[in-house]
Amino acid sequence: MKLPRSTFLAWILRMPLIKRWALMHSIKKENIAEHSHQVAVIAHLLTVIKNNYFDGNLSAERAATIALYHEVSETKLQDINHVTKYHNADLTKEFKKLEEIAELECLDSLPKELQEQFKPLLVQSCVEPEYKKIVKAADLISAYLKACDELNFGNQEFSHVKKRLEQMLAEYVNTMPEVSYFMDVFKEHCFVSVDKLANSDH
């Protein structure tokens, strides 16, 4: 029996080629593979915190997997600037349509027998709401940490980004105790030198 050939992994392996923050000056370059990994780690942590301290009952592994694939549409569309994407409601609606088309194309690139299992991971409109919220919070935290990092290196181009993300994160901090816990416990040490980081572990 001749097995079908799939382009799915080939698209995923191109994620390191796709730059984030493409319209902005960045001191530390970032691609969507790096970003997706970071979001997956944060989503995993948020879910473990939720389950351990705040009566959650979600799969941390599922949250991490959804986060790994949450930017899959950008393998075909590249990174779209936030201000452009959300400039007005009509543009946002059209960009969301394009993203879903790209997600469905990625899904269709898999062998038919695997598509049902991957659909709630790849197609954002099919992700369960409780996981979508965790991943969105992780996505915002990742972007916020990036903005803070750039500012620490003197890149003032990210000052307005930090303010916007602080406003967006405030809702999550107020409604998701795991996000508040995460920010209190983990944020501070993300911006220290490696020497101070090593000394803090003793």
Image (cartoon, rainbow, N blue to C red):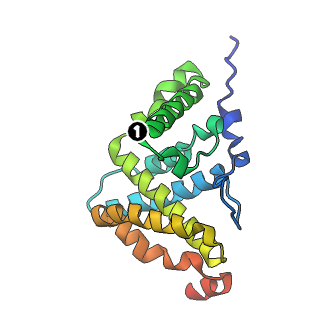
- Left or right, 94 with respect to 23, comes to left
Q: Quadrant of the N terminus?
A: top right
In percent of the image, x 50 and y 31: which residue is there?
100
Find residue 167 and report its image quarter.
bottom left
Q: Position of residue 146 (x, y in %)?
A: 58, 66
Q: Is residue 31 depicted above or below 179 in this figure?
A: above
User: Is residue 63 shown above or below 94?
Assistant: below
Residue 132 placed where, x, y %? Answer: 40, 46
Residue under the image location 69 percent in, 27 percent down: 7
Which three-letter amino acid code belongs to the residue tagged 1?
Val
Q: Say which quarter of the image contains residue 145.
A: bottom right
Q: Classify 191 as above or below 107.
A: below
Front residue of this view, candidates 116 and 123: 123
Q: Furthest-top residue in view?
A: 1
Give the number of marks: 1
For the C terminus, give its image quadrant: bottom right
**Is residue 68 rendered to the left or right of residue 167?**
right
Q: Residue at x 40, y 60 (%)?
A: 168
Q: Position of residue 25 (x, y in %)?
A: 69, 62
Q: Secondary structure at mark 1?
A: loop
Q: Which residue is mark 1?
A: 127
* Residue 110 x %, y %: 60, 25
Q: Residues within 10 Å of mark 1 (few under 14, many from 20)?
A: some
